[in-house]
Image (tube, rainbow, N blue to C red):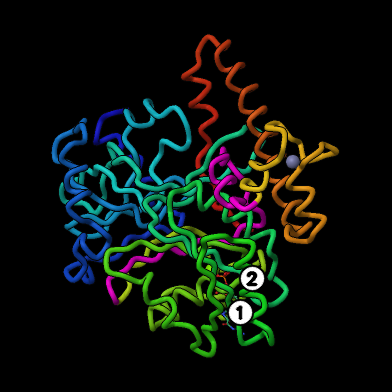
Amino acid sequence: MNNPQETADRLGSASGGNGFAPDTAGSDAACTLGAFGWNEQWQTAFEAAPKPAAGLVPARVTAQFTNQYRVRCEAGELAAEVSGKFQFQASARGDYPAVGDWVLAQPLPGERRAVIHGVLPRRTAMIRRAAGSVPEEQVIGANIDTLFIVNALNGDYNVSKIERYLVAAWESGASPVVLLTKADLCDDAGRRVAEVESAAPGVPVHAVSALEDQGRGELAPYLRPGRTIAVTGSSGAGKSTLLNWLAGEERQHVQGVREDDARGRHTTTHRELFPLPGGFIMMDTPGMRELQLWDAGDGRQEAFSDIEALAASCRFRDCKHGAELGCAVKQALRNGSLDERRYASYKKTGRELAHQAKKEQAVTKRAKKSADKRLAARENQARPAIDYD
Ligand SMILES: Nc1nc2c(ncn2[C@@H]2O[C@H](COP(=O)(O)OP(=O)(O)O)[C@@H](O)[C@H]2O)c(=O)[nH]1
Ligand SMILES: [Mg+2]
Ligand SMILES: [Zn+2]
């Protein structure tokens, strides 16, 4: 399995029918690694990384398809797949490269393909629980500096949904920013901005309209050279439109523009990085019906820091905020300084994370009993599915 030729053969057969095709060499010259966020820190990390093969170069994963990657290295864009040894050593799905990762790539001579032999340690990782019955983490974006949580100011508007994304965002290490899109469709955007601000302590909130070119100036501080920005949120919230607007040209299809396929209105089908004029890098993502949280205890504490602070001043350290005397949370709910909706959202995310931790523990126990743990882990490592809504 660890034979480069075998890997090349697998790459060859896999690249046939799935619509995967790297750019031709033509546009490569203008795109150096710097345009994809490469800098001295990454250079240092690359030099320090173990090199399991010869001829390794740094490359960034710019797109991920079912079982293939597209990576960008100094020599241009290449199709890539992980080495057999990498597969053998990976013990969890989260060990595999994700869009945004910097990897150790071995370009195959004379071909526009490469084999991935390693992943540089991630600075940030946006993680969710993968769909499926086995609890598994799925990295939906790596090395994201700023996460735009996109929620449209029409029927999509939902503060509790934003709170959920904030839990995952804080956990990821990326700096969250809430963008309320389609401001042209809303008469009281200002009130909603204030409402979201109170549900997102310490997080900047902006109302924008790509359609009417409103709010671009407010976003300027995030759009700095070398910075990676990911957009996340429900399908139809305007993520791809936002990317096109900030790019100043159509880089992504948006809903309603391309003729509908059998699945309906979904146009963004995979995560992909785009280097944009201005030197920043944007990651577009397909919409998610629901963001399933993964192991995000600290992220929850951060996202609900106001409630955590109240809880710290309850009389009893282990206060459940039920009928206890001296409960600061109950008092805040009574006097209206804490919103019932927000408290419900806090409790819901807590229950979910606890439930999931239990499930994970059960799986770990079973895996320990298993005589061939590694084999089990490899079988569980389903290929990342395209996540349509
Ligand atoms: N009125 C209005 N519509 C918008 C705006 N931004 C996006 N849309 C529309 O919302 C729909 C979904 O946009 P799209 O970018 O595909 O959403 P995505 O699924 O989040 O990528 C499209 O029909 C867009 O034209 C906006 O600022 N104002
Ligand atoms: Mg889209
Ligand atoms: Zn209490």
Amino acid on which disc 2 is placed: Arg
Q: Which residues are magenta?
A: 278-306
Q: Is mark 2 within 8 Å of ligand 1?
A: yes
Q: Residue 206's x, y, as percent? A: 53, 75
Q: In terms of depth relative to the viewer, which is nearer, 279 or 7?
A: 279
Give the left or right position of residue 243, taking residue 191 as reference.
left
Q: Residue, x 38% and y 45% (percent of image)? A: 13
303 magenta-colored: yes
Disc assigned to residue 162:
none
Q: Is residue 180 left or right of residue 160?
A: left
Rate crowding at label 2 as few (under 14), some (14 to 19) or many (20 or more) other CA atoms within 10 Å: some
Q: CA–CA distance between discs 1 and 2?
A: 7 Å
Tell which residue pokes out farthest to the right in this image.
323
Compare marks 1 and 2 and give the one earlier in the sequence.
1
User: Which residue position holds label 2?
Assistant: 265
Quadrant (top left, top right, bottom left, bottom right) of the N terminus: top left
**Residue flagged by tag 1: what amino acid is it?**
Gly
Q: Which residue is mark 1?
A: 256
Residue 100 position within the rendered picture, expressed as x and y whole percent measured from the top left: 37, 53
Q: Is mark 1 within 8 Å of ligand 1?
A: yes
> Foreground residue, 140 or 27?
140
Q: Mark 1 near mark 2, Cβ–Cβ under 8 Å?
A: yes
Q: Residue at x 64, y 61 (%)?
A: 199
The answer to which quarter of the image holds residue 336 is bottom right
Total numbered labels placed on residues in the image: 2
Q: Callout 1 environment at 10 Å: few (<14), some (14 to 19), or many (20+)? A: few
x and y, in percent, of residue 267 in the image: 56, 68
Q: Nearer the viewer, residue 221 or 291?
A: 221
